[in-house]
Image (cartoon, coloured by chain):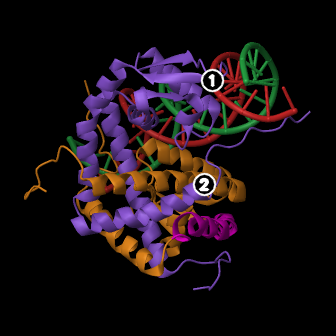
Chain colours: A orange, B purple, C green, D red
DNA sequence: TATTGTTATACTCTATAACTATA
DNA sequence: TATAGTTATAGAGTATAACAATA
């Protein structure tokens, strides 16, 4: 171990093991969850995340930019997904009264219904794929450890939402 | 906690916390690593995984089917990626002497070179995104816990490589 | 001038099904 | 007949850049 924070040129065996297990689990969880969401509610994973985020928000409403955070990495990508969700009647979009530049996305009743239809299977899949093999104590440890990593990622923006490019005249 | 393995209808708070942290970290790590691989070696994440898998294999050779495992979820997807890698000269493909139906993919020197070019930045990114916030002890715990989950996923195939469909005449 | 969001466009990737060839 | 891989094709998703409108 170095004693400061110079970029390391290799990973320790434990780090390698953790990284491999992490990628293996996350890729399988992601793939299985995507299939479940598609079959239970005809949702892509991104669409599910957007709906879930709205479901957590007060009044089920968020500005486009706030909705995007951490889910989608380009503005046009969000517009695209929001259009799909709106066409299906799962969300509504309306200009914000506060700031006329903003669009406020609101979870519609049909959107809540789809979330409700999809949740049980989602939870079951996550339990089966991630938690079935873990003791309660290990789940707590996992939450604590990954929480630390997540906190740091949030504090040290590796730029989730890429800032707008300057013109290249 | 139920005392058997009936499918649960909800997650405990600790499980929810672990799941959210897990998805948050894995999505950010994935996105950042993809950008790094693209800029350092013009590789997609899937292509990197395929090359890395070949790099780990004895003689740097694998049958298509073995190469696919856990990385790609359709045969045609693997053929597509293998073609791209072959066009760039990073791998070679040849029919297997043992079984003439099989194609053996071999890592070419150029492929090893790209892996070498990409590794340092990859390791640095993983360190920065995942391990910088964790103590050595926590890294060990993470490896142990996720290793358990991975073992179970391997033992309980949620069908990574979907079996071939029957004809619908 | 900076910010919010949309549009146009091109591209990458994936999946399904049909097909070939070998076991 | 079953398995290994390829091909054809179609669709979903993403990113870049140009654009309009508001702050």
Residue located 58% across and 20% down the image: B96
Residue C12, percent across and down?
48, 28
Q: CA distance from mark 2 to mark 1?
A: 28 Å
Q: Is residue B34 left or right of residue A120?
A: left
* Chain part drawn in magenta: A109-133
Q: Which residue is mark 1?
A: B102
Q: Which residue is mark 2?
A: A32
Residue located 35% across and 54% down the image: A17
Residue B1, percent across and down?
57, 86
Please tell me whether mark 1 sits on a helix, a strand or a loop: loop
Quadrant assignment for the C terminus of chain B: top right
Please tell me whether mark 2 sits on a helix, a strand or a loop: helix
User: In which quarter of the view is residue B73 placed?
Assistant: top right
Residue located 59% across and 58% down the image: B155
Q: In the rendered image of this protein, does residue A52 appear above or below residue A6?
A: below
User: In which quarter of the view is residue A151 placed?
Assistant: bottom left
Whether residue A32 is visible to the viewer of this picture, yes or no, is yes
Whether residue A69 is visible to the viewer of this picture, yes or no, is no
């Amino acid at each position: 171990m170095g004693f400061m924070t110079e970029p390391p040129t290799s990973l320790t065996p434990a780090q390698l093991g953790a990284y491999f297990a992490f990628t293996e689990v996350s890729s399988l969880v992601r793939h299985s969850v995507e299939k479940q969401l598609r079959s239970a509610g005809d949702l892509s994973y991104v669409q599910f995340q957007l709906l879930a985020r709205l479901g957590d928000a007060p009044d089920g409403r968020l500005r486009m930019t706030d909705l995007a955070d951490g889910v989608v990495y380009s503005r046009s990508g969000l517009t695209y997904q929001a259009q799909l969700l709106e066409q299906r009647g799962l969300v509504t979009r309306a200009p914000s009264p506060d700031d006329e530049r903003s669009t406020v996305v609101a979870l519609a009743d049909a959107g809540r219904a789809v979330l409700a239809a999809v949740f049980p299977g989602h939870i079951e899949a996550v339990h089966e794929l991630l938690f079935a093999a873990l003791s309660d104590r290990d789940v707590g440890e996992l939450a604590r450890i990954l929480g630390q990593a997540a906190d740091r990622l949030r504090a040290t923006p590796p730029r989730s939402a890429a800032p707008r490019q300057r013109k290249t005249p």
